[in-house]
Image (tube, rainbow, N blue to C red):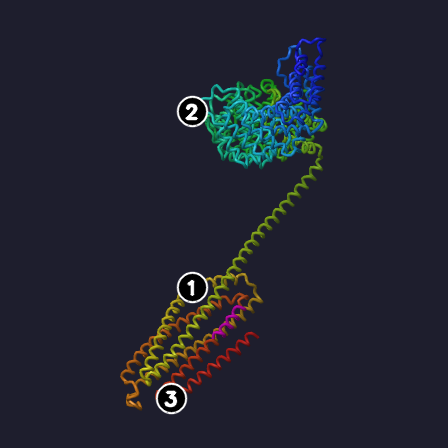
Amino acid sequence: MTMNFFRGVMGGQPAGPQPTGAETIHKLCDRVASSTLLEDRRDAVRALKSLSKKYRMEVGTQAMDHLVHILQTDRSDSEILGYALDTLYNIICNDEEEEQDESEDENAQKQDEDLGVLFTDKFLGDSENVTLLLTLLEEFDFHVRWPGVKLLTALLKNQCNQVQGVILVSPMGVSRLMDLLADSREVIRNDGLLLLQQLTKGNAAIQKIVAFENAFERLLDIITEEGSSDGGIVVEDCLLLLVNLLKNNSSNQNFFKEGSYIQRMKPWFEVGDDNSGWSAQKVTNLHLMLQLVRVMVSPVNSPGATSSCQKSMYQCGLLQQLCTILMATGVPADILTETINTVSEVIRGSQINQDYFASVNAPSNPPRPAIVVLLMSMVNERQPFVLRCAVLYCFQCFLYKNQKGQGEIVATLLPSTIDANSISAGQLLCGGLFSADSLSNWCAAVALAHALQDNLTQKEQLLRVQLATSLGKPPVSLLQQCTNILSQGDKINRRGSKVQTRVGLLMLLCTWISNCPIAVTHFLHNQENVPFLTGQISENLGEDERLVQGLCALLLGICIYYNDNSLENYTKDKLKQLIEKRIGKENFVEKLGFVTKHELYSRAAQKPQPVFPSPEQMLFDHEFTKLVKELEGVITKAVHKTSEEEKKEEEVKKTLEQHDSIVIQYKDLIRDQDTQIQELREQVSTLSLNSEQMQNQITQQQSQIQQHKDQYNILKLKLGKDSQGLSSSQGEGAHVNGLHSEELSQLREEVEELRRQHALQHTQLSDKDSLINTLRCGAAAAAQTAEGGAGGSDNTELLGEVESLRSRVQAQCAEISQLQTERLELIRRAEAVSSVPASSSESSADTVPVSELESRLAAQTTEAERLKEECRGLREGHAGLEQQLASATSTVAIEQTEKTKLLQEVQESKKEQDDLLMLLADQDQKILNLKQRLRDLGETIDEDEDELDARDQFGEDDDDDDEEEEDEENND
């Protein structure tokens, strides 16, 4: 039954009359809606697909809802999904694949486009349809994915903004579309590129999402796989998508630069020696590659981003590669033109790139600078117009914010630098300026004007240029020659009658004398210039001459505004009077307004690149439009001002100049004071650091002194022990002899320790000398910055305290000397005891032989003498250290902050004396013990020695009490 039905629909011989297309489509739609079997619905959708191109209106009107329902319900069958998507694509897409009849007119084509938009709006009536379509794109089946990609592309072509909005808010919508680039089937990947091209048009948000989905990496990989510039249409599609992502999108441009993708562009521009026979696809690809470079360095981008990209292009060698193409032979003219434009924007405003471009030489014999070769093309009227415009743009970009380059170009015109054997840029510009070709005149005038842009020095230098007009006549200046061409009637008829030439010369003169009073004076010095300008402005000329009148008014206004009144006949007041009498102020202002009202003025003001449909429309330069905008208002005010207003303005200017000079003086004073403050801060920081270092050094010195005193006390005690041992050894037997030997061995070990400590003291003494020198330098610096009055009294107090400390140290030295004297006395007495005869013993059987005792005593006496010498050396070292301490303390005492430190040192010295007294007490006790032992052995000890020891003890106690009293007084 089903097959019979489709035979009737698809062409079987019907029993009755033939149904119309609309009726057939209606029956198929009913079948799609009512059939329960999937096969029936599939056959019906297949039939609708076959009729969708011929009966587009009927299928779109009746079947769209049914087809959308199929997409929603029959997700399990990829075949019916493919038929439904193909049918929707046929009724929405406006591309006509079949050949149309020649009789079909534009109205029929417009109707088809309207149908596509109509059905697109119907499909987009429910935004869920787009979401459904995005979901279907996840299907890997070719018969679903490919028609889905084509359908979404068609929707984007018809209603881009609406579809973009739905995809943007759809979860993972853009990510699903980016997965198409990873599809292994090239047809889907390539159509995915077309889809992304439509998706990214004019939507910065989607562009950012696509870029951060790793689009740059994938696209550059595809370009490399397809052969770069030698690749096919796929490379072109990738480049178009890259241009969409980067153009006017600063975020993506920065991401592209930071991802080091600029470096991957360099291999695209590697060309060989043989550049003949380029295919059309290669030319297209290279065009887009150059366009992509220009997008990154476009003048409309932010200056910071452009400068960063220019720097990267130089560092990776991309600029060098472009210059290689520029100088290569056999490159197609359109590629050469676009390369010149690309190089122009890569070097524009970048000093390092401009310097490199100036160093590029053409491979000629002899080698010529690339700039000269390009200028030769610009002034050659046989070269293509677009190429000449590109060279002019390149020259302008080379001189943009490049005072060094401007000076080099002007220098080629000066008499001292002209080389008759070679062609220079200046010679080419002068030749073009005065040639018979009006386009060469205009280009040369504009190029020379850019050599003077915002450069007062070069404007004055160009006044020195002299030209030889003919044999036998004196040379004239370049300024005079330009004005002669404008003012002399016979030359105007021959050369300057063309508006283009006169406009170019007037733009050059306006740029030249603006903001340069010396050039204004030179211009006014020619008596014919002002009458010519007033005559041109006052005449009633045709439409073509209005622009020339406006530029003449601008030139005359510049002569007024930048006039320094150095010429009596042409002061500001006299020129304004001349305008009022011969032209009229209102008429002058009206003629001045002709410039900005010209239709080509606004076009030139839009972007720096000179792009003109034809040579005749090449009248305005972009930089000149900015000059006109700057000067028009001030010239109008200057013309309307009276002499009294001029005087008031001059007075105000003088006052402002005086005020500015005063402000500058104060700024300089403040700057100097800031510098001084900074230096003083550094000095304070240095002094603080030195103070900390000195404090650390004093602490170290104090600890070293403490160590020396401890060592001295130990030595003194050991010497006392030795004296006691000598006294007791004469009366003891073998047991006592063994005891003395043991003590003597211990004493020797301690003496060795003292030797090592003494060596350490010498090392520390040398270190202390260097520290003392540092302290002296710091104290001298501090003395220069210290204040007078209060500081003097503090220093006096500190010096008094130092003297007190010094007296105490001297007392300690005296005490040490007394103790050493006592030790020597003990040794002497021990020697006297050793000389007593053996007969004085009470029992010869109980005592040791006298000879043995004498030998032992002699050995001990020798050892005691050696220890005496070492003690003397230590005492001298100690005295030297105390002297160094006193000197260092007196030097550092200049600073007020050292007062507390010195008090602390006195307290520590008191503690040291206490320790010394304790050690002396121990020594005295040991001496008494030894004397007692000698008495026990039967030796006679004089009572005078006991009294002396007692006095020593009492004297030490008295000294200790005196020191305590002195410390209390100092603390008070």
Q: Quadrant of the C terminus?
A: bottom right
Q: In the rendered image of this protein, does residue 942 appear above or below residue 897?
A: below
Q: Position of residue 419 (x, y in %)?
A: 46, 28
Q: What segment carries the magenta color?
A: 900-912
* Amino acid found under the numbered disc labelled 2: Asn
Crowd band around label 3 with a 10 angstrom C-alpha radius: few (<14), some (14–19), many (20+): few
Tell me how far mark 1 sits from mark 3, CA to CA.
Answer: 48 Å
* Mark 2 / mark 3, whichever is N-terminal: 2
Crowd band around label 1 with a 10 angstrom C-alpha radius: few (<14), some (14–19), many (20+): few
* Amino acid found under the numbered disc labelled 3: Asp
Judging from the image, what secondary structure is the residue with disc 1 in?
A: helix
The foreground one among 6 and 23 is 6
Q: In the rendered image of this protein, does residue 819 appear above or below residue 772?
A: below
Q: Is residue 905 magenta?
A: yes
Residue hosting label 2: 365
Q: Quadrant of residue 592?
A: top right
